[in-house]
Amino acid sequence: MTYDSGNVFAKILKGEIPCKKVYEDTHVLAFHDINPQAPTHVLVIPKGAYVSMDDFSETASDAELAGFVRGVGKVARQLGLVEPGYRVLANHGRNANQDVPHFHLHIFGGRNLGPMLKRPE
């Protein structure tokens, strides 16, 4: 998958599309998902042009990597999710249904989220 500079998250970063911002710093932007899957559903994206976790972990600078992880923690604390808990999810590629070719993490919380994956029947 190659980076598409016209993807929706790139447009949000450029200010072309509005978002309901939760947190922003030098390395990350966090905002509410427009189609929430839990009472709290926030997306955290790096400000650099990275397609996936694989791309980000391989090519981002140490400052970007640390800034991103710290940003995720700051968002979780700001939203009061540390206790009773939250889930972090990143989709990578076709089999994981990655919809936007810009690396991002989902933070889910606000209720019991149940098992990690649905078990086959």
Image: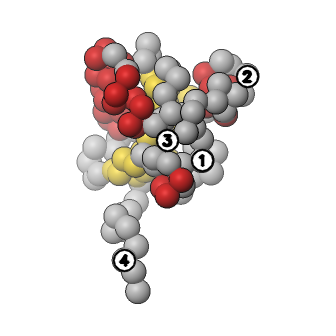
- Of mark 4 and mark 2, the one earlier in the sequence is 2
Image coordinates for residue 69, horizontal then vertical, percent? 31, 29
Q: What residue type is labelled 4?
A: Arg
Question: Gap between marks 3 and 2, in whole Å?
Answer: 19 Å
Q: Find out whether the residues at labels 1 and 4 contact each other: C-beta distance under 8 Å.
A: no
On screen, residue 75 versus residue 31, left or right, reads left
Q: In the displayed image of the protein, which residue is found farthest to the bottom?
A: 121
Which of 87 and 21 lies nearest the eye of the viewer?
Answer: 87
- Which quarter of the figure has residue 120? bottom left
Q: Is mark 2 on a helix, strand or loop?
A: loop
Residue 86's disc is none
Indicate the amino acid at tag 2. Answer: Glu
Circle 2: is it few (<14), some (14-19), or many (20+) Cα within 10 Å? Answer: few
Q: List the residue tagged with mark 3.
A: 42
CA–CA distance in space, label 1 to label 4: 23 Å
Q: Earlier in the sequence, mark 3 or mark 1?
A: 3
Residue 77 picture location, percent across and down: 32, 35
Q: Residue at x 49, y 28 (%)?
A: 50
Residue named by callout 4:
119
| Mark number, residue 16 | 2
Q: Quadrant of the C terminus?
A: bottom left
Q: Name the residue under label 1.
A: 99
Q: In this view, does 63 lie above or below 57?
A: above
